[in-house]
Image (cartoon, coloured by chain):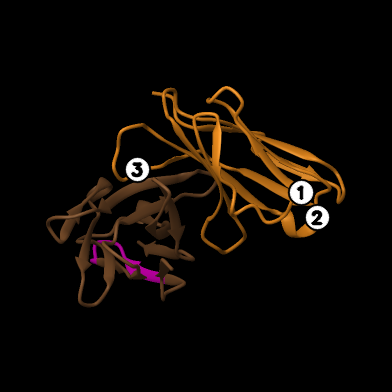
Chain colours: A brown, B orange
Amino acid sequence: AQSVAQPEDQVNVAEGNPLTVKCTYSVSGNPYLFWYVQYPNRGLQFLLKYITGDNLVKGSYGFEAEFNKSQTSFHLKKPSALVSDSALYFCAVRAPSGGYNKLIFGAGTRLAVHP
Amino acid sequence: GAGVSQSPRYKVAKRGQDVALRCDPISGHVSLFWYQQALGQGPEFLTYFQNEAQLDKSGLPSDRFFAERPEGSVSTLKIQRTQQEDSAVYLCASSPPGLAVETQYFGPGTRLLVL
């Protein structure tokens, strides 16, 4: 069965410092991995995805994620955090089923960026 | 362009009432998903439509939950005889056709509170 783990409930970072939000996965077959961000009272917004190719994936708002097959990880990163990055971040994995792809989400990590 | 919209944004129901939640996907999107997000958790898959066909309803928690998409565009999630454990945010997502791994675009959600 496909699953995703986000080991940190909350990550605190000072503005301007690099940030990392961790995600590990368990899949059968090739992993298709996603990061979404959720701001208060707004829907999930797509940040980036890994399907194949370069292990470093670049996404929206300056975020990137590094796929590591040996560690089964897909950590989200940003070189310099902004206060406006404070939000809830979800890692997700594709669970293929009968020709379509439903997403299995982690429990989420709350990112707090302090001025 | 217009994104996925959902209505109502908030719904308070008394235990035992029936509720109907509406999703307007992005025009032209073939795939439509419903997810349930309990407080402090990641979204969990409920059901999937391809056009008007409901291809997967394995995530619906009980037979009190029913979803339809009769004309292949707008979808309605109905919950009969609501219970307190149904309190959650209900998210709708849609995807365009032709992508091998769909990027799902989420609506803002309907927050349901059952008293």
Q: Which dot marks residue B102?
A: 3
Q: Which residues are magenta?
A: A11-18
Amino acid at circle 3: Glu
Is A5 contained in the magenta span? no
Q: Residues within 10 Å of mark 2 (few under 14, many from 20)?
A: some
Q: Residue at image x 65%, y 46%? A: B111
Q: Residue at image x 65%, y 39%? A: B67
Same subunit: marks 3 and 2 = yes
Measuring from the top left, give residue B22's x and y in whole percent: 64, 32
Amino acid at circle 2: Gln
Label 3, label 2: how many angstroms apart (C-alpha)?
33 Å
Give the side of residue B58 with respect to residue A6, left or right. Answer: right
Amino acid at circle 1: Arg
Q: Which dot marks residue B83?
A: 2
Mark 2 and mark 1 in contact (Cβ < 8 Å)?
yes
Q: Give the image quarter of residue B53.
A: top right
Q: Residue at image x 55%, y 63%? A: B41
Question: Is the C terminus of chain A in the top left, top right, bottom left or bottom right quadrant?
Answer: bottom left
Between B41 and B20, which is closer to the camera in this rendering?
B20
